[in-house]
Amino acid sequence: MDEQNTIERCDYIHAHEDIIAKVNETMPDEEILYDLAELFKIFGDSTRIKILYVLFEAEMCVCDIAQLLNMTQSAISHQLRALKQSKLVKYRREGKTVFYSLADDHVRSILDQGMEHVAE
């Protein structure tokens, strides 16, 4: 079988120009789609998901998160850095202690919808 036979072909002789035009009008810019893909990559790590779920329940410091997840503070800090860069978590300083929490209700919604989808 040659390469031409393995390529899927459209059965239509002409494209549906009206559908293509409609989708093109609403298609976000390439940069926006790239940023969205990068955001979803952050959710592709189970450690980061665990941290987000911990912070879904309560604001916590690195020490508490590390103890709860049975991980090193260094590993938690590394993941928190990625979550902060993606604007999924925020922090506040109280003396020498830094407390982390979810950045906003959008993060809660993403987690809720993801769990709902997985549970179906």
Image (tube, rainbow, N blue to C red):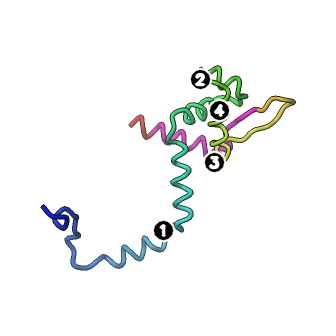
Q: CA distance from mark 2 to mark 3?
A: 21 Å
Q: CA distance from mark 1 to mark 3?
A: 23 Å
Look at the image and say whether residue 11 sits in the magenta stretch. no
83 w.r.t. 17: above or below: above
Q: CA distance from mark 3 to mark 4?
A: 15 Å
Disc 4 residue type?
Answer: Leu
Mark 2 is surrounded, within 10 Å at the Cα level, by few (under 14), some (14 to 19) or many (20 or more) other residues, namely few
Discs 2, 3 touching: Cβ within 8 Å: no
Mark 3 is surrounded, within 10 Å at the Cα level, by few (under 14), some (14 to 19) or many (20 or more) other residues, namely some
Q: Is residue 6 left or right of residue 110?
A: left
Residue holding disc 2: 69
Residue at 31% of width from left, 76% of height from top?
16
The circle drawn on residue 86 is 3
Q: CA distance from mark 1 to mark 4?
A: 33 Å
Q: Of the two numbered discs 2 and 1 on the same chain, state the one appearing first in sequence.
A: 1
Q: CA distance from mark 4 to mark 2?
A: 12 Å
Q: Which residues are magenta?
A: 99-116
Quadrant the N terminus occupies: bottom left
Determine the secondary structure under disc 1: loop
Q: Is residue 61 left or right of residue 45?
A: right
Residue holding disc 1: 27
Q: Of the two numbered discs 1 and 4 on the same chain, state the one appearing first in sequence.
A: 1
- Residue that extends furthest to the front in the rendered view of this protein: 2
Quadrant the C terminus occupies: top left
Q: Is residue 1 left or right of residue 39?
A: left
Disc 2 residue type?
Answer: Leu
